[in-house]
Image (cartoon, rainbow, N blue to C red):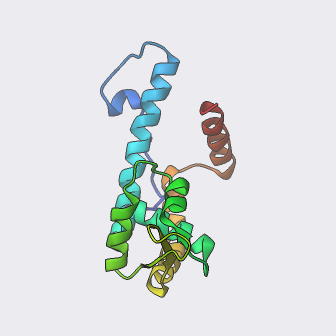
Amino acid sequence: MGFGSSCFFYSMKIEDEIKQPKFKDPFQKAVINLIFTANWLQTKHQDFFKAEGITIQQFNILRILKGQYPKSISATEIKSRMLDKNSDVSRLLDRMVAKKLVVKQVCPNDKRAADVSITEDGLEILTTLEKRQAELDGVLHLSEEDAKTLSDLLDKSRG
């Protein structure tokens, strides 16, 4: 079955996925299910971005920079906007500079800081990925209403 194919969908319960028939209570089951599903989803994303030679974190940085385009943004500000707050932004940016996806320039106001902007190559990768976005969006096999409900519940769970 292809990445975004919806011809056949088999849903496996968390009990079967991790071979654990019982949970202490519904809260424990929900947390374990959420962790398992987050890891599963991350693997799907890694496979999706691998075709373009980038990582999930690099994609996140490209999206942040596209939102600023044509202006630049500091590495500190990029880190504050990242989905993965534990990312080593300096290392990621150095790799992206080597791939010619971003450029770094010394900040005129603070010589210790760097301003970062997206390159044409970086924008091109985002354009290519946007054409395939439906594949990524369809991986959850949810209706639009279910996706909204799930998003609302996730927001609520972070309280």
Q: Classify residue 24 as left or right of residue 17.
A: right
**Residue 96: where, in percent of width, then height?**
37, 73
**Residue 110: where, in percent of width, then height?**
51, 69
Is 141 above or below relative to 100?
Answer: above
The front one of 105 and 135 is: 105
Q: Classify residue 141 as left or right of residue 98.
A: right
Is 147 above or below relative to 107?
Answer: above
Residue drawn at 33 percent across, 67 percent down: 50
**Residue 44: where, in percent of width, then height?**
39, 55
- The image quadrant that residue 152 belongs to is top right
The front one of 103 and 148 is: 103
The front one of 24 and 80 is: 80
Residue drawn at 31 percent across, 79 percent down: 98
Extreme-bottom residue of the structure: 120
Q: Classify residue 98 as left or right of residue 67.
A: left
Tell me the quarter of the image containing the C terminus: top right
Tell me the quarter of the image containing the N terminus: bottom left
Residue 154 visible somewhere in the drawing:
yes
**Residue 145: where, in percent of width, then height?**
69, 47
